[in-house]
Image (cartoon, rainbow, N blue to C red):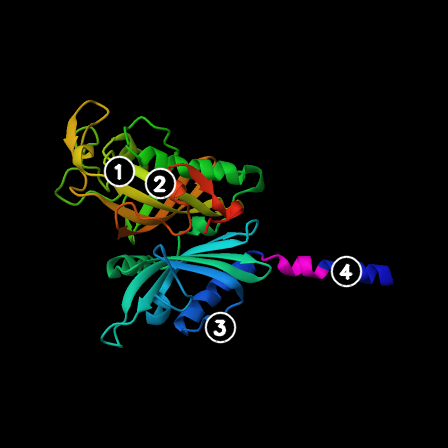
């Protein structure tokens, strides 16, 4: 009996170190509550916890921690129990000159949890009222994100990352001939609005992917990529897959979209038409993007993006990795300081 008791007590620390889905999602909620209270001491933090906001390393308590004035409506959480990471898109409110009218904003949050303590915090704050209000109008995430994939159809984390990465590879210098792994019902929301499958406005004609000079939000995911009209996205780099939920088939990523401008604005479509499109000056999107994947195809995509200095680094990658377009599953390996 004493031996059994000793074995049971020895197992307690290991069990306590495991943070399941409920635990991870609970810590995410506590993090948002602590920001609203402007009090990091409410959280179980590792002594050497590291925090960034929009690529800048700060002390926990700075940035949005100082200005958060309320919660929004929208929250979509991706839990990676195997890696001890949780990531989310959350709408918030930030202080304004009129306290009665706080400003809506969106924030992407990543927490790494080890032995019950938060060791890493990464955030991307998008100060866009239009985006936050769009997500809040949507209200709740698409039920597909909360639906488990049948056990017999679940993909490995490596396969889920491969499918998600095909999206970035297909968009980078898009030529209309890549491997496009979209389900027939694929739909995408960016910055609070649908950017695929929109109805054609009354009195207008639906743009033809074979003749249009700019890709249209009225097209499907597949039509947009096969059009070749996204060629002006010259590089999608620092592709960090930070939370992979194999039970629900979701991958959460951070990345940067570079637009080099200049000669990259001039290109040919798959059928040989010459097109000039894209930004006229070099700039970068800093992006948080997630993918719902079933049967090897992307069904839902959601993203927020914030304009950043051209060539910016995430603050979690080496210079070489920050410039690279290779896929990195950092939910398992950890980020580089």
Q: Residue furthest front?
A: 319
Q: Residue at x 33, y 39 (%)?
A: 236
User: In front here: 295 or 122?
Assistant: 122
Q: Nearer the viewer, mark 2 or mark 3?
A: 2
State the SS at label 4: helix
For label 4, the crowd category at 10 Å Cα-Cα, with few meaning under 14, some 14 to 19 and many 20 or more, is: few
User: In front here: 27 or 217?
Assistant: 27
Q: Look at the image and say whether residue 253 sits in the magenta stretch.
A: no
Q: Residue furthest right?
A: 1
Q: CA distance from mark 3 to mark 4?
A: 32 Å
Please report contact status of discs 1 and 4: CB closer than 8 Å, yes or no: no
Q: CA distance from mark 2 to mark 4?
A: 49 Å
Q: For mark 1, what is the residue? A: 233
**In this figure, what is the number of numbered marks?**
4
Q: For mark 3, what is the residue? A: 41
Q: Is residue 208 left or right of residue 2?
A: left
User: In front here: 136 or 315?
Assistant: 315
Looking at the image, tell me whether mark 2 or mark 3 is earlier in sequence order.
3
In the picture, the quarter occupied by the N terminus is bottom right
Q: Nearer the viewer, mark 2 or mark 4?
A: 2
Q: For mark 2, what is the residue? A: 323
Q: CA distance from mark 3 to mark 1?
A: 42 Å
Looking at the image, tell me whether mark 3 or mark 4 is earlier in sequence order.
4
For label 2, the crowd category at 10 Å Cα-Cα, with few meaning under 14, some 14 to 19 and many 20 or more, is: some
Looking at the image, tell me whether mark 1 or mark 4 is earlier in sequence order.
4
Please report contact status of discs 3 and 1: CB closer than 8 Å, yes or no: no
- Range shown magenta: 12-19
Q: Look at the image and say whether residue 15 sits in the magenta stretch.
A: yes
Q: For mark 4, what is the residue? A: 8
333 over 229 or under it: above or below: below
Residue 31 is tagged as: none
State the SS at label 2: helix
């Amino acid at each position: 009996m004493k031996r059994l008791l000793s074995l049971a007590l020895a197992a307690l620390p290991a069990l306590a170190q495991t943070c399941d889905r409920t635990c991870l999602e609970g810590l995410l909620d506590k993090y948002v509550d602590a920001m609203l209270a402007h009090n990091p001491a409410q959280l179980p933090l590792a002594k050497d916890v590291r925090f960034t906001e929009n690529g800048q390393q700060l002390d926990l308590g700075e940035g949005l921690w100082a200005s958060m004035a309320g919660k929004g409506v929208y929250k979509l959480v991706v839990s990676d129990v195997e890696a001890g990471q949780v990531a989310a898109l959350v709408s918030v409110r930030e202080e304004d000159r009129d306290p009665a009218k706080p400003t809506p904003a969106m924030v992407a949050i990543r927490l790494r949890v080890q032995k019950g303590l938060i060791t890493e915090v990464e955030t991307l704050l998008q100060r866009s009222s239009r985006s936050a209000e769009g997500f809040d109008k949507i209200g709740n995430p698409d039920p597909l994100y909360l639906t488990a994939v049948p056990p017999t159809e679940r993909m490995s984390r490596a396969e889920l990352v491969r499918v998600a990465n095909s999206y970035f590879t297909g968009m980078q210098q898009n030529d209309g001939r890549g491997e496009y792994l979209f389900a027939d019902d694929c739909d995408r929301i960016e910055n609070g609005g649908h950017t695929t499958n929109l109805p054609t406005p009354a009195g207008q004609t639906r743009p033809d992917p074979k003749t249009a000079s700019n890709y249209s939000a009225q097209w499907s995911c597949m039509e947009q990529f096969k059009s070749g009209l996204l060629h002006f996205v010259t590089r999608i780099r620092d592709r960090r897959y930070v939370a992979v939920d194999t039970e629900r088939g979701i991958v959460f990523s951070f990345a940067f979209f570079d637009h080099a401008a200049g000669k990259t604005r001039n290109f040919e479509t798959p059928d040989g038409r010459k097109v000039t499109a894209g930004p006229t000056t070099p700039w970068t999107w800093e992006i948080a993007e997630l993918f719902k994947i079933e049967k090897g195809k992307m069904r839902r995509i959601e993203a927020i993006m914030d304009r950043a200095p051209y060539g910016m680094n995430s603050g979690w990658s080496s210079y070489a990795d920050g410039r690279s377009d290779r896929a990195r599953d950092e939910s398992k390996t950890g980020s580089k300081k």
